């Protein structure tokens, strides 16, 4: 059936709620209202207020309670209204949940999901891409789907995973992406990248909304005879090191693209992985295209300036091809 | 405790969290704080300048006679003696740790619960085996009551391979979700409060109304997560028993500089939950308050805040000589030593323990500690390579399943997932 990216997440979550009685949802305004973006719309009517829990505005309590419930063998799915607010629960995530298995052998099968990303004129507190904060915390898995198919398969895999998973849903894609999604049960394994478009001349490694920018660039460049391979990482922790190395071995030239800010963004880590795994295969410099190092500005022309641009991507690809 | 709520069992509506809160609760104001204490110490600590230095000075009556132990409404002779033994084990284990530290056998520092043994041991004693506890750094006695052994704690401090965390974390930073139902604390304060609330939530989804217990200090209660966690437990009627251990010092800062209320139990009013005050050096008061709060939790009536008043009788950790604590305050609380008073209660007041039985009990504690200390000292350090691995739960290292029972799925009439295109925050 044709589903939007948002509907695919909803479908996946719904199916997991039906499949496994240990799964429950907890968050702000997720019940009667159905969530700020309506991901859990209708859930409370079917699953009841015991399993679809509206909470006070208290992010640390939400994550702490989810972790506590996970210790009893439940599989909580905590919603953040915006991933920008995740800083409020940072300690519970990185010190309590992430370290639990290593420190004292307690598995914490919980999912923290919510919308991230810009290009919707949300301003500095409704547009951020805080994924790199969590990639840096051992014990967490970090997921960031680009397609509706992956969104459903990855949310299901995240719920079934035995570790704390931070699931970044790109809000720009929520209603803009619509595609055929199987009605049946399937999962997309965490830690596996996909080739969103195959090509032999150079690779763009990216994830989430930037996959579409990369595909757009690839379309333009194809007309000039430049065949671009687009790698969609899908999971940022653990990184699919093999897929990264493979595309570099194939094309020998690579652009790293993300919507997150530049310094300390995942592109730096991927560059290091390429250095470790496929240095000899490089025929050009590793190019980074990212947002600028600033808060996400509000006004449309400012945000447009802030975000990675198609023109930059195409120009850098041409330059790299000619290198 | 506030007066009992009259809650005729109402039929549970399928699939909805049926609060036991009476409908009239919103308009009722129940500001009663139940105070178990037989004396109400009243003094304040102020910063004063003496010459060219700033010091803490205590003001108030420090000459009051020591009150008797308040007889428990619930504990019998055997239970009192058990609690007394846990308290002795707690104190003597920490004395052994201090010696091990002086011998250079401890890695890092040692934290003490000296003066707080009644609070740790008698509170944890109120829990059933399948209920849960989250200790703070000074609640090593609670860990013993939950079934961990002194050697576990000693090996934690000595960073041994055989410690519960296999040398990966220190002190009371360990737990177990299989047998002991203890959540390992982290160093930051208040974070266990939402976590224990979540344990109660998870159990409730599995059809069990549990009491879950954790602690916070007069210092730690200032944190935001304390508010978030307790408010969440209150709103959800979760069976949290929160001991606020007011030991007068947050590291080196006196309680008078941490909060403005007279009693921290007053905080309960703001959460709409019962607040109780106990003398934290009286094991019977601690137990009775804990027991009543646990019973309330098991009835599904929600959390209780219990303030236990006492003093931390050592520094923050072993490196801290606590020179900032005015000596008269030490003397005041030393006279109120929880173990000496409980011993007197059992031996002299109740005659539940003869002097010779008491000596035998003390000797058996010493013997247990000696054997545990020898075991811990001679056990190996971890091999370096064991630092690797275990960051993630992978490859079937744990089977995850509901601990109490698989929750029943209530099938309601709601439609399938809605394909709405409703107005949303940002498009």
Image: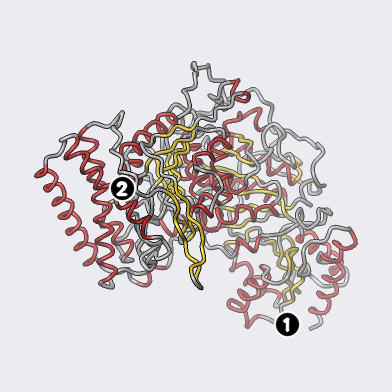
Q: Residue A50, position in %: x, y? A: 57, 31
Frontmost residue, B95 versus A14: B95
Would residue B394 be seen by someone viewing this image from the given angle?
no
Q: Which quarter of the image is occupied by the N terminus of chain B?
A: top left
Q: Give the residue at mark 2.
A: B336
Q: Is residue B356 above or below residue A50?
A: below
Is the residue B189 above or below the residue A198 in the image?
A: above
Q: Nearer the viewer, residue B228 or A219?
A: B228
Identify the image quadrant of residue A194: bottom right
Q: Is residue B4 left or right of residue B18?
A: left
Q: Which disc, if any, is residue A218?
A: none
Label 2 neighbourhood size at 10 Å, few (<14), some (14-19), many (20+)?
A: many
Residue situated in front as seen by the camera: B417 or A83? A83
Residue B115 place in picture, x, y as percent:
33, 52
| Pointer 1 local density, CA inside 10 Å: few below 14, some 14–19, many at least 20 | some
The residues bearing labels 2 and 1 have C-alpha atoms spaced at a distance of: 76 Å
Q: Residue at x 69, y 61 (%)?
A: A232
User: Could you tell me residue B19's position as x and y percent?
Assistant: 56, 26
Instruction: Give the mark count.
Output: 2
Read off the chain for label 1. Answer: A
Dot 1 lies on which element?
loop
State yes or no: discs 2 and 1 in contact (Cβ < 8 Å). no
Chain letter, disc 2 residue: B
Tell me if A310 is positioned left or right of A101 in this view. Answer: right
- From the viewer's side, name the closer residue of A241 and A123: A123
Here the colouring is secondary structure
Q: Which residue is labeled 1 in the image?
A: A284
Residue B18 appears anywhere in the view:
yes
Task: Point out residue A210 in the picture as x, y percentages from the top left corner.
Answer: 76, 61
């Amino acid at each position: 059936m044709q589903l939007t990216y948002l509907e695919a997440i909803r479908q996946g979550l719904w199916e997991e709620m039906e499949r496994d009685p240990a799964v429950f949802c907890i968050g702000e305004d997720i019940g009667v209202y159905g969530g700020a973006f309506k991901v859990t719309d209708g859930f409370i009517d079917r699953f009841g207020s015991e399993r679809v829990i509206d909470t006070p505005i208290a992010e640390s309590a939400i994550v702490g309670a989810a972790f506590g419930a996970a210790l009893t063998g439940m599989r909580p799915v905590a919603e953040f209204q915006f991933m920008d607010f995740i800083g409020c629960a940072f300690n519970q995530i990185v010190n309590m949940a992430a370290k639990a298995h290593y420190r004292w052998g307690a598995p914490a099968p919980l999912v923290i999901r919510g919308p991230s990303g810009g290009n919707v004129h949300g301003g500095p507190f409704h547009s951020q891409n805080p994924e790199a904060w969590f990639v840096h915390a051992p014990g967490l898995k970090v997921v960031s789907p680009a397609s509706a198919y992956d969104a459903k398969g990855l949310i299901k895999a995240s719920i079934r995973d035995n570790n704390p998973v931070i699931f970044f849903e790109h809000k720009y894609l929520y209603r803009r992406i619509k595609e055929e999604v199987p009605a049946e049960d399937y999962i997309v394994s965490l830690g596996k990248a996909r080739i969103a478009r195959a090509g032999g001349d150079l690779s763009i490694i990216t994830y989430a909304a930037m996959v579409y920018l990369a595909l757009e660039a690839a379309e333009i460049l194809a007309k000039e005879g430049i065949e671009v391979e687009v790698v969609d990482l899908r999971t940022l922790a653990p990184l699919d090191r093999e897929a990264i190395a493979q595309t570099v071995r194939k094309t020998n030239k690579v652009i790293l693209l993300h919507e997150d800010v530049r310094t300390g963004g995942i592109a730096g880590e991927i560059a290091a992985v390429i250095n470790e795994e496929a240095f000899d295969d490089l025929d050009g410099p590793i190019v980074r295209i990212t947002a600028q190092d600033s808060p996400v500005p509000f006004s449309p022309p400012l945000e447009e300036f802030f975000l990675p641009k198609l023109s930059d991507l195409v120009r850098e690809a041409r330059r790299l091809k000619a290198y | 405790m506030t007066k009992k709520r009259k809650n005729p069992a109402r039929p549970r509506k399928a699939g909805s969290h049926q609060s036991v809160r009476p409908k009239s609760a919103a308009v009722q104001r129940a500001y009663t704080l139940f105070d178990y204490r037989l004396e109400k110490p009243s003094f304040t600590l102020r910063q004063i300048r003496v010459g060219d230095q700033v010091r803490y000075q205590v003001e108030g009556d420090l000459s009051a006679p020591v009150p008797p132990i308040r007889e428990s409404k619930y504990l019998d002779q055997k239970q009192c003696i058990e609690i007394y033994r846990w308290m002795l084990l707690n104190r003597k284990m920490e004395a052994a740790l201090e010696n091990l530290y002086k011998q250079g056998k401890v890695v890092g520092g040692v934290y003490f619960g000296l003066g707080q043994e009644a609070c740790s041991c008698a509170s944890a004693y109120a829990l059933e085996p399948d209920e849960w506890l989250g200790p703070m750094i000074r609640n090593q006695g609670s860990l013993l009551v939950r079934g961990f052994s002194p050697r576990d704690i000693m090996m934690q401090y000595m960073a041994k391979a055989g410690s519960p965390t296999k040398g990966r974390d220190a002190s009371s930073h360990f737990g177990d979700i299989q047998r002991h139902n203890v959540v390992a604390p982290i160093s930051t304060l208040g974070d266990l409060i939402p976590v224990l609330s979540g344990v109660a939530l998870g159990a409730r989804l599995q059809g069990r109304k549990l009491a879950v217990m954790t602690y916070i200090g007069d210092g730690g209660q200032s944190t935001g997560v304390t508010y978030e966690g307790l408010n969440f437990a209150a709103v959800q009627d979760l069976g949290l028993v929160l001991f606020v251990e007011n030991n007068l010092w947050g590291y080196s800062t006196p309680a008078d500089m941490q909060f403005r209320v007279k009693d921290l139990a007053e905080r309960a009013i703001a959460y709409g939950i019962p607040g109780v005050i106990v003398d934290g050096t009286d094991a019977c008061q601690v137990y009775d308050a804990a027991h009543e709060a646990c019973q309330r939790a098991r009835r599904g009536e929600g959390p209780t805040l219990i303030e236990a008043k006492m003093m931390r009788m050592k520094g923050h950790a072993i490196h801290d000589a606590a020179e900032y604590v005015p000596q008269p305050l030490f003397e005041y609380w030393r006279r109120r030593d929880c173990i000496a008073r409980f011993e007197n209660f059992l031996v002299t007041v109740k005659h539940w323990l003869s002097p010779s039985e008491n000596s035998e009990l003390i000797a058996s504690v010493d013997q247990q500690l000696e054997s545990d200390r020898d075991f811990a000292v001679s056990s190996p350090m971890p091999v370096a390579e064991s630092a690797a691995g275990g960051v993630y739960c992978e490859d079937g290292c744990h089977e995850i399943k509901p601990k109490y029972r698989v929750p029943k799925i209530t099938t309601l009439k709601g439609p399938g997932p809605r394909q709405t295109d409703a107005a949303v925050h940002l498009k």
